[in-house]
Amino acid sequence: MHIEKTAAAGTLESSDCLVTVEPSASEIKLEIESVVLSQYGEEIRGTVLETLKSLHVQAASVHVQDKGALNCVIAARVEAAVLRAQGEGGQE
Amino acid sequence: MIRTLSFLPGNTPNMLINGETLGADALILDLEDAVSPAEKDTARILVRNYLRTQRIRKTFLIVRINATDTAYWRDDLAIILPEKPDAVLPTKVSGRQMLDTLTAEMSRVEQDAGLERPTPLLPLIETAMGVENAIEIASYSDRIMGLALGGEDLTADLHCKRTKEGQEIFYARTRLVCAARAAGVNVFDTPFTDVDDMEGLEKDAQFAKALGFSGKLVISPRHIDTVNAVFSPTEEEIEYARLILACIRDAKAQGKGVVSLRGKMIDAPIVARARQVVEDARQIFGEEEDTDE
């Protein structure tokens, strides 16, 4: 999938995360802010990259603001943001 | 046995991930009223991932999909059904025609996903037409696992005020119980909507149980324990049921055709009720199966 526009999904509530994706020229740029970054930073990174790969996203700038979300929540928010960046789904 | 069915907003991770700790027999993951139109897409994906990865316990998981007169319900089914929820709760079910449309789409999605078992349906009856067609809905097909009553939308459709006493929904309650029992499926009462009135909740749940409901929808986690307690057999009921079954066993052994207990004739309906109480106790409290018969 090609990231056509900036889009976001999720919230900053506890156990959730806000994922913002933006177009990028040629690579995945990933930035993570998390209350549990030192403990789970690598796991979050792995979940985001795996989700992007499953959606065939090869170039995107991704910003994750995590509030202690489980992997299934992070994956859901990344997928929703990517789909919204295609012009599909509910809102930008 | 399902006594409580607790609604959880489909787009709120904090509530979803803690849902199975609340003590409800069933959770209704809500894609409809609890989710704003702008978040339908994110909720669907979140609920799908929850079903896919977070099924830890034995809680019965139901997904409430959007109404068939909206643009959302087909996408709801396409994303949710492949994850095999225990049931789908369609809203404002009014009769056979709506069920034809719904089940045709469900069958198509299930076939594409290679599902062997049709997903059960728990139709939410919340219109005057739905109430009048209750027996048609309850007996529609093997997919129907029960009926659920939605009193708030129903009273709006009836052009009357929803009250705590609930006289305005008495006809609907009894009609749904009768239809569901005639069709051999469960029937669940409308939620009690005053979160803080625990006394009113208990009274309302006891009334529903007395009418024949199997359990009750709940909209607040605070209501779960009370509703569970009301729809569970008491120790006295369990003890009496076991005594009846023991009497029947003894009577059979002695070749007696007529049995009485405490001066009361024990006939087939009483035995059937006793068996049901013992089975309910086994499911709820994990007690050993009664083998007295």
Image (spheres, helix red, strand yellow):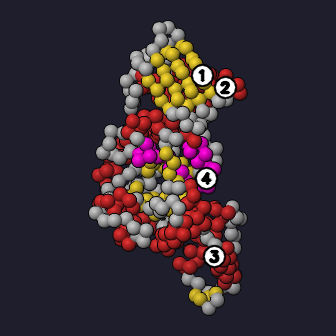
* Residue at point 59%, 89% (across, down): B264
Rendering coords of residue B28 (x, y %): 50, 50
The answer to the question of whether label 4 and label 1 lie on touching residues, with beta carbons closer than 8 A, is: no
Image coordinates for residue B194, horizontal then vertical, percent = 48, 61
Is B29 left, or right, of B228 in this rendering? Answer: left
Is residue B153 in the magenta section?
Answer: no
Q: Quadrant of residue B72?
A: top left
Asked whether the residues under the numbered discs 1 and 2 touch, taking CB atoms below 8 Å apart as contact, a structural biologist would say yes
Binning the other alpha carbons within 10 Å of mark 3 as few (below 14), some (14 to 19) or many (20 upward) gives: some
The answer to whether B277 is drawn above or below residue A48 in the figure is below
Identify the residue shown where x is 63% and y is 76%: B237
Q: What residue is at 34 percent from the left and 65 percent from the top?
A: B161
What's the residue type where badge 3 is placed?
A: Glu
Mark 4, residue position: B22
Q: CA distance from mark 4 to mark 1?
A: 32 Å
Q: Secondary structure at mark 1?
A: strand
Name the residue carrying label 1. A32
Label 1 Cα neighbours within 10 Å, binned few <14 / some 14-19 / many ≥20 = some
Residue B170 appears in the figure: no
Give amino acid for label 2: Leu
**Residue wearing tag 2:** A37
Q: Secondary structure at mark 3?
A: helix
